[in-house]
Image: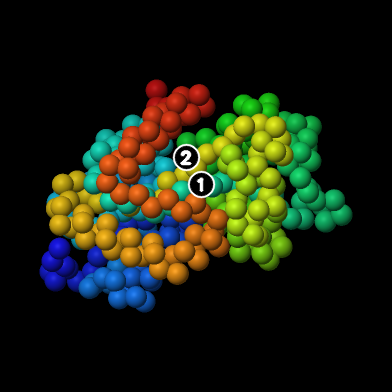
């Protein structure tokens, strides 16, 4: 692919600053510069409006553009299903799946009081049951992954939260630290720094297995902690505009594989407890197709589909 005509490449993050998508986008940009993997700088642009709709529609409108890519979460599915915006993943060009992300049930490390904070998921769930509709669950966006998980937890355990949406995962965790919400369902990397600083506590991971990384491995699964089989993995993938030239697709696939294989990116996966899951081509498309259907089913069950 000839990139000489472009002063820079644009990497759109379909989420707010500080969250997982933004962190990954800026890491990719930094790795590209550090290891000289791109002939042009990669500029990260956040377009989080409308739960990612702003970014999706922007890239959809750049038909044939070889110089723009977008990092998507599972809002690739949830936003169109909930809002009815004229967009679907088939409007874009699949390039690569970089990782799959897990979710954790977090609480403030000092709540409800410094003398007796919540130490286990059972303690927290008991408190929620004692005061239904009094507990606030923070998450990224409305009718997105975080709210889907919250509804699954409510349905599985007979709970009721007040769901409070924020623009990005970084903002979600900051509000937990500030005691503006009682719990969150953040991705590991979005709360990792606050956890290491002793401000928040992970109670359970929403996966079928524990996170197999040393510092995370003691966190029980939701099924282990609460007996409820509630699990979910979120996409961290890259797409291009519609009708992206094949030469450009091939260049980005090779570029992203080089990024993925760097020690920097592998450390990021380990530190953030992301599941290594690089995929391209037919494998990636098959996964996207299957997960589009899964999200439709989950959102229908939670009453989140646009009527």
**What is the tally of numbered marks visible in this picture?**
2
Q: Relative to 225, does residue 257 appear above or below in the rendering?
A: below
**32 shown above or below 163:** below
Q: Residues within 10 Å of mark 1 (few under 14, many from 20)?
A: many
Which residue shows up at 60% across the image and 53% down it? Answer: 212
Q: Are marks 1 and 2 in contact (CB under 8 Å)?
A: yes
Could you tell me which residue is drawn at 51 percent across and 46 percent down?
Answer: 140
For residue 28, above or below residue 207:
below
Q: Quadrant of the C terminus?
A: top left
The crowding category of the residue bearing disc 2, from other C-alpha atoms within 10 Å (few below 14, some 14 to 19, many at least 20), is many
Looking at the rendering, which quadrant does residue 214 occupy? Answer: bottom right
Element type at mark 1: strand
Q: Position of residue 238 (x, y in %)?
A: 33, 52
x and y percentages locating residue 105 in the rendered image: 64, 45
- Left or right, 282 with reference to 102: left
Q: Give the quarter of the image for residue 247.
A: bottom left
Residue 276's mark?
A: none
Q: Can I make out residue 147 in this image?
A: no
- Residue 22 at what x, y percent from top left? 43, 59
Q: Secondary structure at mark 2?
A: loop
* Distance in Å between CA atoms under marks 1 and 2: 7 Å
Q: Mark 2 sits on what residue?
A: 144
Residue ID for mark 1: 140
Residue 212 vs residue 150, the one in the foreground: 212
């Amino acid at each position: 692919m000839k990139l000489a005509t472009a002063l820079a490449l644009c990497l759109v993050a379909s989420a707010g600053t500080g969250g997982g998508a933004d962190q990954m986008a800026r890491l990719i940009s930094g790795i590209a510069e550090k290891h000289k993997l791109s002939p042009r700088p990669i500029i990260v642009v956040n377009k989080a409006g409308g739960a990612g709709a702003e970014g999706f529609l922007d890239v959809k409108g750049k038909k044939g553009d070889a110089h723009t890519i977008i990092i998507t979460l599972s809002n690739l599915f949830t936003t169109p299903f909930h809002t009815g915006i004229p967009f679907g993943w088939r409007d874009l060009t699949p390039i690569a799946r970089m990782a799959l992300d897990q979710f954790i049930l977090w609480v403030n490390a000092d709540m409800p009081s410094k003398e007796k904070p919540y130490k286990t998921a059972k303690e927290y769930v008991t408190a929620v049951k004692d005061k239904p509709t009094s507990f606030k669950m923070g998450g990224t966006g409305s009718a997105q992954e975080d709210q889907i998980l919250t509804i699954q937890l409510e349905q599985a355990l007979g709970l009721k939260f007040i769901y409070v949406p924020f623009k990005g995962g970084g903002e979600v965790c900051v509000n937990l630290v500030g005691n503006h919400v009682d719990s969150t369902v953040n991705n590991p990397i979005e709360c990792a720094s606050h956890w290491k600083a002793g401000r928040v506590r992970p109670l359970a991971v929403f996966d079928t297995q524990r996170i197999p990384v040393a510092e995370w491995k003691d966190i029980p699964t939701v099924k282990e902690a609460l007996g409820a089989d509630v699990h979910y993995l979120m996409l961290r993938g890259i797409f291009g505009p519609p009708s992206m030239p094949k030469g450009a697709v091939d260049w980005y696939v090779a570029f992203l594989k080089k990024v993925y294989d760097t020690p920097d990116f592998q450390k990021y996966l380990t530190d953030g407890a992301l599941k290594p899951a690089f995929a391209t081509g037919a494998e990636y498309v098959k996964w996207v197709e299957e997960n589009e259907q899964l999200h439709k089913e989950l959102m229908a069950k939670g009453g989140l589909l646009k009527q």
